[in-house]
Image: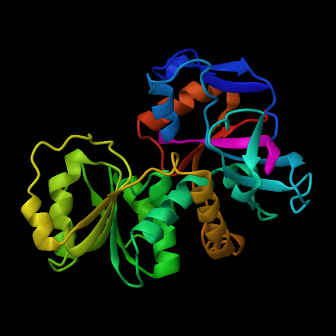
Amino acid sequence: MKAISIKKPGGSEQLEIQERPVPSLEEGELLIKVQASAINRTDTLTRENKQLSEPYPILGVEVAGIVVDSNLADEKIAIGTRIAGLVNHGGYAEYVAMPADRVFHMPDTMSFEEAAAIPEVFLTAYQTLYWLGKLKQGETVLIHAGASGVGTAAIQLAKKMTKANVIVTAGSEEKLEFCKELGADKGINYKKEDFAKEVLDYTQNKGVDLILDFIGASYWDQNVASIKTDGRWILIGTLGGAIVEKVNLGVFLQKRIAIQGTLLTPRSDQYKAELTNEFVKKVMPYFENNSIKPIIDTTFSFGDVTSAHLYMEENKNTGKIILSIQE
């Protein structure tokens, strides 16, 4: 089968299409004929990881496709079923093996491209808002990178499931307007405005209950100023740097700030299965009635994966970048 891996760790120029064997199935797995995958930050980090040794992994952590074989003790998921879900690696390929307890069935009206736009970002958004962030009805959440895949997912979940007050940051007026169309109550252009000042003005100096932070070091002081007493702060990424030079721990004590870091990809298979199961029960009905929707920016062909990675690294996207596997 055709699959996308790397020649060696490095930039997007190291991506290449290779011939790899079709995966063999372990007990409890399905073989999926992949129709669409999606580009994620974790893919670019894997591509650059100099700790990797050969044979390098097939990239891609989420897929949508058709079940063509199974190794299950029962036949609960039939051959021909349209499914989507998370894989540990291997999504940029014509076939992938997937644990059956990590799939969700696609609504009949949903395209493979739309389904591939769901697993990583919506599961991350659900996990950070509710499992870790404990977002409650009517609370206020600050979502950085509001126009990103996780950002657009989190806006919708917070509004539809919790009726939260949603503040977002983004780097252009177009992106902010789109976030507002998804339900964001307040948009802040981080390139032109001091977001902490805007947050405090909007919240009458109370601050926010929860922050979803993809940025890290460069936003540190403004996040500290933006969060209210007893606020929760979930660190999901370090796009703005991983090293904070000076930290005033006193303000953390005074405000009783709870900060937690998380990455979904390295989590255990059991964790991902439990998260998927709860997500299917609580969130998939919103997709079925079209009150929550996957957001797709651009679809790239399988052979144009280099351009897709560059597009993500240049932060051009509003929503998901999809990779079409079947040409």
Q: Position of residue 226 (x, y in %)?
A: 19, 66
Q: Position of residue 235 (x, y in %)?
A: 34, 55
Horizontal side of 324 relative to 310 (left or right) equals: right
Q: Residue furthest top?
A: 7
Quarter containing the C terminus: top right
Q: Residue at x 53, y 36 (%)?
A: 43
Quarter containing the N terminus: top right
Give the dominant element type of the magenta stretch: helix, strand or loop.
Answer: strand
User: How was the colour assigned to the protein in this rendering?
Assistant: rainbow
Q: Residue at x 55, y 48 (%)?
A: 320
* Relative vertical location of residue 133 with respect to residue 32 in this rendering, above or below: below
Asked if one can make out residue 181 in the rendered structure from this viewpoint, the answer is no
Does residue 170 show up magenta in the picture? no
* Relative vertical location of residue 247 with respect to residue 180 in this rendering, above or below: above
Horizontal side of 254 relative to 199 (left or right) equals: left
Asked if one can make out residue 267 in the rendered structure from this viewpoint, the answer is yes
Q: Quadrant of residue 179?
A: bottom left
Q: Quadrant of residue 229?
A: bottom left
Q: Quadrant of residue 273?
A: bottom right
Q: Residue at x 62, y 52 (%)?
A: 269
Q: Position of residue 167 (x, y in %)?
A: 33, 68
Front residue of 194 and 144: 144
Q: Position of residue 256 (x, y in %)?
A: 18, 72
Which span is picked out in magenta?
26-41
Does residue 34 show up magenta in the picture? yes
Front residue of 69 and 318: 69
